[in-house]
Image: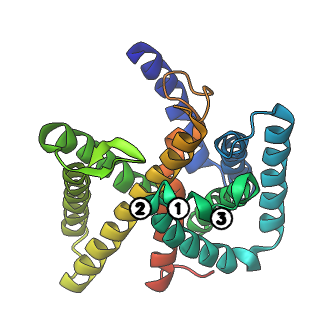
Amino acid sequence: MLKQRIITAAILLPIALIGFFLLEGLAFAIFIGVAVTLGGWEWARLAGFSSQSVRVGYAAGVALLLAVLYANPALAAWVLAAAIAWWVFATFLVLGYPQSRRYWGGAGGSLAFGFLVLLPAWQALVLLKQWPMGNWLIVAVMVLVWVADIGAYFSGRRFGRRKLAPEVSPGKSWEGLFGGLVASLLVTVGVGLYRDWAPRELVLALLGAAVVVLISVIGDLTESMFKRNAGIKDSSQLLPGHGGVMDRIDSLTAAVPVFAVLLWLAGWGAL
């Protein structure tokens, strides 16, 4: 399993770096759109649909909506606003699971939730790419999430006692959450010192990093909630040793839109 994971990562990493740093405009939007569309194919299964025709049809619907968003950039603000509302609601769903299932609206509602998970993540990445230091903004949000994941893993293994969301993901603990948060904040402090941020800028950056990391946890738990409800371990087997696309991007689907909104509120870029 470890060898398989390493081989898959060794193949995917250069592809991701080329896509993020060398592609621009429509090519970048399509590159991200392919991953999001594959995520849509997996989400239909999470929503309870095993039929390939339904899953392919849902993925095609995701791709069509991405094309509509690309052709209508004025919709970006509405998409990100919907994302903020969704992730607040998703927090409620995760904390209340399994009783919160009555608010899902059945399989159809679960499919609709998939649009709210996937489309804003794509929209936010397209926006970040267009803003000043766009490539590094994308790297920054990914590093925040990855560092938090790594910190949570090790602190959870060493100190984990109290379950964070036992009905959703029994392996996660409050100690892991705090460890991941501290790790990401330390990285933020390091970047702030390196870039010589003023005290006010550093405080705002720390607050923003904390919000992004915490919402990334909700993204992770949201996918876990739907997987648990569907009775599956991985969203698919598209990535040998890693599960599916959604298993790799679940935290980012929540973190990236919130990161973009926080930067917009700080005056970094325009919607």
Residue 132 appears in the rendering: no
Q: Look at the image and tell me in which quarter the C terminus lies.
A: bottom right
Give the Cα separation between the discs numbered 1 and 2: 8 Å
Q: Residues within 10 Å of mark 1 (few under 14, many from 20)?
A: few
Residue 49, percent from left and from top: 75, 40
Location of residue 15 by image quarter = top right
The amino acid at mark 1 is: Ser
Mark 3 highlights which residue?
123
Q: Look at the image and tell me in which quarter the N terminus lies.
A: top left
Mark 2 highlights which residue?
95
With respect to residue 137, does 267 lie above or below?
below
- For the residues carrying marks 1 and 2, which lies nearer the camera in this image? 1
> Going 48% across and 45% down the picture, which residue do you hit?
224
Q: Residues within 10 Å of mark 3 (few under 14, many from 20)?
A: many
Left/right of residue 132 with respect to residue 148 in the rendered view: right
Q: Are marks 1 and 2 in contact (CB under 8 Å)?
A: yes
Mark 1 highlights which residue?
100
Say which element carries label 1: helix
Give the Cα separation between the discs numbered 2 and 3: 27 Å
Residue with the most extreme left position: 159
The amino acid at mark 3 is: Gln
Say which element carries label 2: helix
